[in-house]
Amino acid sequence: MQEKQEHSENDDETDLASIDSRELARKDSDVMSPTKNIVEPDNALPVVKKADLPDSWQQAMARAGWAELTPVQSRAIPYIMAGRDLMVQSRTGSGKTGAFILPILERINPLQDACQALVLVPTRELAQQVSQDALTLAEGRGVRVVAVYGGVGYGPQLEAFRKGAHLVVGTPGRVLDHLLRRSLSLADLKILVFDEADRLLSMGFYPDMLEVRRYLPARRINGYMFSATFPLRVRQLAKQFLHEPDFLGLSSDNVHVVETEHSYYVVPGMDKDRSLVRIIEVENPDSAIIFCNTKDRVHYVKVVLQRFGYDADELSADLSQKERDKVLTRVRQGKLRFLVATDVAARGIDIPELSHVVQYEPPEDPELYIHRAGRTGRAGASGEAIVLVNEMEELKLKRIARQYHIDLQQRPLPSDEDVAAIVAERATVFLETKQRTRDKLQTERMQRFIPLAQRLSASEEGLALLAMLLDDEYQQTMHNPPSLEELGTRPSADKQQSGGKKRRRSGKPRSRK
């Protein structure tokens, strides 16, 4: 049946096989409904209210300006206090930080000068934010908090560790640096938290996460993951860090259907292609179908993406059967990141782990929006449905959203400066990770180029050369990366190093179960 659908490209465009648009519209309406059920573990714990909290907790909430507990705080806190590993799916801005900081502070012994709780976050900005919230909530409790991230000197962080920081909030790379230096020990760790877990277990951070895991205590500790979305890949990798975790979902009606988020960007009509590139850099999709209304535009978008270094290919009625089969094989094997297609060409293709659907333009037929968006958020995965519109197309898109009761959110179009900052942060993570795998001889060899790097950085022409090298490294690492499975089976840094101090653990990650 599927093969027959793939080959019937000349059928009427609106006759999209195997998908009932009314059912998809109903599903999206249910997912977006504010009254949808909350997903709880089978042996759920009672919800806690502000009045149930100790006076010290209520005073901490008052200092932070929190009048009441948010739903994620009311439901997650009992599990953390009970020491049950947990994955918490809740929207950004729902109060997740308070949900783990308040019970962490209660479980920390301020008389024990050691790291007892570690919160890993993907960015320095989030590290600063979470640590500041923790400092506010911990006031008067004697709990020492330190934010640990790259791009700044080691001095204040080392001093905080010498004083015995109880709660460490940091990015994986800098935390790993301190573990390698032995300035940070996790021997007394009780709680490990992943904030924005979907980003921490993405391609960029996963190698560092594996290395950090090797320094966790052999004994059982409690682990918690908080995220707005839990793609299938994240749920699979979570088993490497958590022990039989429960799942708590506060914005879905079924653990197997997390949700599809619908958003759109208003872009200049003559700059849609460059806007798409900026959005891709910011969103960083694992995989996506990019829909266009015409085959000519499909080809154009594919060429633009390929020129920018992305792994992209097209699917349109102009392709020969041999070319079509070749593209479809890559799609089914998960070896193609971006598929650019028309609605007719993409008919019958099912990609269960598709993270994003991008509509380069809204469809001519409103029903096609539902068909397109319905291709993500399937088979237990969360998904994102994104539309690019100019000012005239925005009115059309809003009519579609009203017709199908879709909660459609506008997002600000990323600027070149926004993209540059994100790319710089990712590139720094990649380079720091690569540097940590170098042995003494490689590090000694590298020293020869420091004078050249200093000279190049002092001139405009030299900066262009350095930027070219960084761009090449970024493209190779970001857009042609090894699979997560390959990374998980690579020899550890211990086995790669021929000199220097040995780590206190063997190369093979130790199971916490």
Image (cartoon, rainbow, N blue to C red):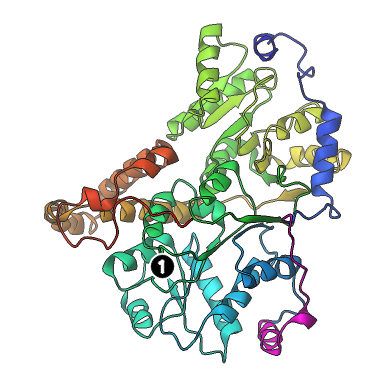
- In the shown orientation, is residue 344 left or right of residue 281? right
Q: Is residue 400 visible?
A: no
Residue 400, picture quadrant: top right
Secondary element at tag 1: loop
The residue singled out by tag 1 in the image is 149
Picture coordinates of residue 138, whole percent (x, y): 57, 84
Please determine whether, in this image, residue 445 is positioned above or below residue 181.
above
Whether the magenta-drawn stretch holds residue 107 is answered as no
The residue shown at (58%, 47%) is 235
As drawn, is 306 to the left or to the right of 182?
A: right
Percent of width and height locating residue 391? 73, 42
Horizontal arrangement in the rendering, residue 504 relative to residue 341 (left or right): left
Which quadrant of the view contains residue 178? bottom left
Determine which quarter of the picture holds residue 93: bottom right
Q: Quadrant of the N terminus?
A: top right
* Residue 423 visible in rendering: yes
Q: Which of 466 and 63 is in front in this view?
A: 63
Amino acid beneath label 1: Tyr
Q: Measured from the top left, where is residue 149 in percent x and y?
A: 41, 67
> Please, is residue 224 above or below residue 187 in the view?
above
Question: Does the magenta-highlighted stretch encompass residue 60?
Answer: yes
Tell me the residue at 76%/66% (across/down).
71
Please state the extent of the stretch shown in magenta in the rendering. 41-64
- For the point 42% across and 80% down, which residue is it? 165
Instruction: Classify mark 1: residues with Cα within 10 Å, few (<14), some (14-19) or many (20+).
Output: many
Residue nearest the observer in this picture, 390 or 61: 61
